[in-house]
Image: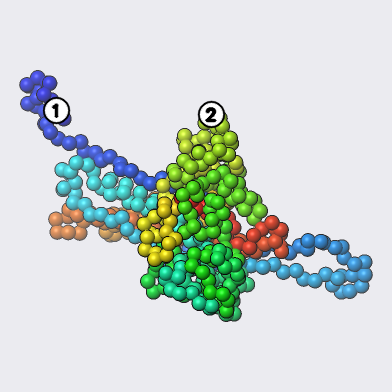
Amino acid sequence: MAVENFSTMIENTVQQNYIYREVEEGLDSIQGYRQIAIQEEFPNGIGDTVTRTRKSRLAISQTPTPISPQSSLSLDDGLSPMTYSIEQYTMTLYDYAAATGDLDVVQNLVGSFDQLLAISRNSGVYFAQLRERLARNALFNAYLGGNTRVRVDLGTSSTTTCHVDDIRGFQTLLVNGVQTPVSATNSLNVVESGSVSQTLVVTGVAADGSNASVSPGGVSGVLTFSTATAPVHGDSLVAVNAATILRPNAKSTTAALGAGDIFTTQLILDALVQMEDNGVPPLPDGTYPLFCPPKTRRELMADQDFKTWYAGREQSSVWKKGYILKDLGVTFVPLTEVQIQSQSSHTGNSQTDAVAQNVYRPIMVGAEALIEGTFAGMQSYVRNVAGDAKSAVDVVLVDNIAQILRRPIDRMGRWWSFAGDWIGGYAVPTDATASPSIALPTASNAQFKRAVVFEHV
């Protein structure tokens, strides 16, 4: 603070050149994925796997017929027992402890801001971003699964094996409702499209010792299949139970995307058809959220079809906070926690299939597409610490995150230690039993139906 313009008497009585004891906030990412997660508490211990079971509806014939008038002559009245199918999904709880910090209380008194408040604030932001990314990764791991491409730069294809960019979604399939490893007994049909059109009967999957996948979170590996024509480099491989991925101009793989493959209204309409065909309910507000990066929104605003829909919407009450728009039955939610496949990740391929631009992945979701599980035992932990007068730590539970402050134990009693802790996990439920043969004639064969992933440059 400068006081040169004050009188000499005042100038001599005011301490000069001091700094404010404040700290300003930095930039944070814009989040959203976790907001759609159903919040559940689990009593299970750390590392335990929780299994949840869903049942199907009873199968209905496409041409129902009445019972025979003679059916009453039999003990069962001409009726046969009807059974329903089940499917299971699992969730594993993990302990995420981080956002630690040490504080010298004496130094804090002469510092430029209250360091304890800064540490606590950063811890909250850290765990918010951590859970957001766990939620995002869980969604994309499920909905990108079963979609990949052949890469002979990782190894030559044969009539029984081929190397692929990502084996997620090919490793297991539902057998009697239970996720079971793919094998000769439980094989998975995979459709190859591109230079060769054929169906591969996959009997085994193995991850590479050194992961070379260019897909975020992907795992490169080898598919083993019954004898067929050797798959061709760059061809798409899509499992029969894979979720939908929509790309501009009907591009079949991520590597096929190029200049001009931008986001359009037609992709949104195609996704809506997928959601409605599968009977996926929207969120309580009646719309499907579309989580998209700023670049997606910019490309959409340049689309002529969207301009027609959008005309006059800036004056409408559907705008929230100036940037969330509801239109076409969709709520457009911009965020920066986006899964982006960078251009540089393709340059290591020896083949000429590198993507010339970054690949962006918006995702549209329906109700109950994601479940967040939190360990209920943290509440007991907090109560036990609070009731122990001799405890060296103070614990506060905020949004199921334990903020832990340990009192000084050094000789001079100056150093306080801070840490954050969250125990939980995320699961993406399957809906494989919602099939054309049961209650939804328009349903797809995908085991994950409650979201649609887009890819564009």
Read off the residue under disc 2. 315
Residue 18 versus residue 399 in the image, above or below: above
Q: Residue at x 60, y 62 (%)?
A: 446
SS at badge 1: loop
Residue 114, horizontal then vertical, whole percent: 23, 43
In the rendered picture of this protein, how many numbered marks are placed on residues?
A: 2
Whichever of labels 2 and 1 marks the residue nearer the N terminus, that label is 1
Residue 145, horizontal then vertical, whole percent: 51, 63
Read off the residue under disc 1. 2
Residue 410, horizontal then vertical, whole percent: 17, 59
The quadrant of the rendering that contains the N terminus is top left
Q: Residue at x 58, y 76 (%)?
A: 228
SS at badge 2: helix
Apparent side of residue 445 relative to residue 409 in the rendered image (left or right): right
Residue 211 versus residue 361 in the image, above or below: below
Q: Residue at x 27, y 59 (%)?
A: 392
